[in-house]
Image (tube, rainbow, N blue to C red):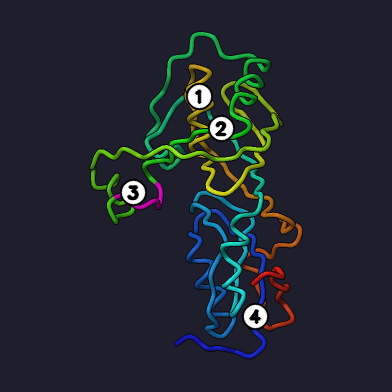
Amino acid sequence: MTVSAPDMHGLLIVDKPVGCSSMDVVRVVRRLAGRVKTGHAGTLDPLASGVMICCLGRATKAVEQLMGQTKIYDTTIDLSAFTATDDAEGKREPVDVSSPPSADQIRAALDRLTGDVEQVPPAHSAIKIGGKRAYKLARAGETITMPPRMVRIDSIDLRCYEWPTLDITVTCGKGTYIRSLARQIGDILGTGGYLTALRRTAIGKYTTDRAIPLDELPEPITPGHLLPAPPRW
């Protein structure tokens, strides 16, 4: 049963660990907050970690507004292979690369993927195709054609590169799939490209230094632990 507590309305910034789903986080927060209505402003895959905004009570009305904010990700990409899932969960399909790209070639590829970019979402994603989740169809062995979409990528910063490992920081808008970006980088370079690590460090002004690790959430969560929701909600 969902409880409507008079003062349990606001945001809780959680640092999601690797290994659990976004809905797992929501269930934990809801339980610790006394079954108050709880939602989140942006999914993170189980293999990803970092900032999740949990919206409690009337603040659930702010979900769409919060999801539209700029996001920042730190990610590690393996350029030596592709996978069906575009991350380390899928089976590696090695790519024969006779001459690894230089750092300058890497930067040129990243520049090509900055701005308004057409992107094909991963087949193993939660997007609905014909009313069914794409990842369920993919896992059932069905061939899926994912429609492309336009996304906004504000910047891609090269942090470290030592073949075949590439570390970058991506600042982007709503709907960007970093897994798809890894594949796109590999396509441009003539290499592979799949994620081996992904961490979301910010959604708008909500950053990891304001986030509470999931296993350190207070019990119970009280109104004093919540941040105010944005003004338009």
Q: Secondary structure at mark 3?
A: helix
The residue lying at 58 percent from left, 44 percent from top is 198
Residue topped by disc 3: 134
Task: Tell me the amino acid under the disc marked 3.
Answer: Ala
Q: Which residue is mark 1?
A: 186
Q: Secondary structure at mark 4?
A: loop
Q: Disc 2 marks which amino acid?
A: Ile
Drawn side of residue 148 relative to residue 159, left or right: left
Q: CA distance from mark 1 to mark 2?
A: 9 Å
Dividing the picture into quadrants, the one containing residue 105 is: top right
1 or 2: mark nearer the eye: 1
3 vs 1, front mark: 3
Comes first in the chain, label 3 or label 1: 3
Residues at marks 1 and 2 touching, judged by CB atoms closer than 8 Å: yes
The CA distance from mark 2 to mark 4 is 38 Å
- Quadrant location of the C terminus? bottom right
- Residue interval drawn in magenta: 125-129
Q: Name the residue tied to disc 4.
A: 9
Is residue 107 on the magenta stretch?
no
Residues at badges 4 and 3 in contact (C-beta under 8 Å)? no
Q: Earlier in the sequence, mark 4 or mark 1?
A: 4
Circle number at residue 216: none
Q: Is residue 100 above or below residue 64?
A: above
Identify the image quadrant of residue 69.
Answer: bottom right
> CA gap, disc 3 to disc 1?
23 Å
Q: Secondary structure at mark 1?
A: helix
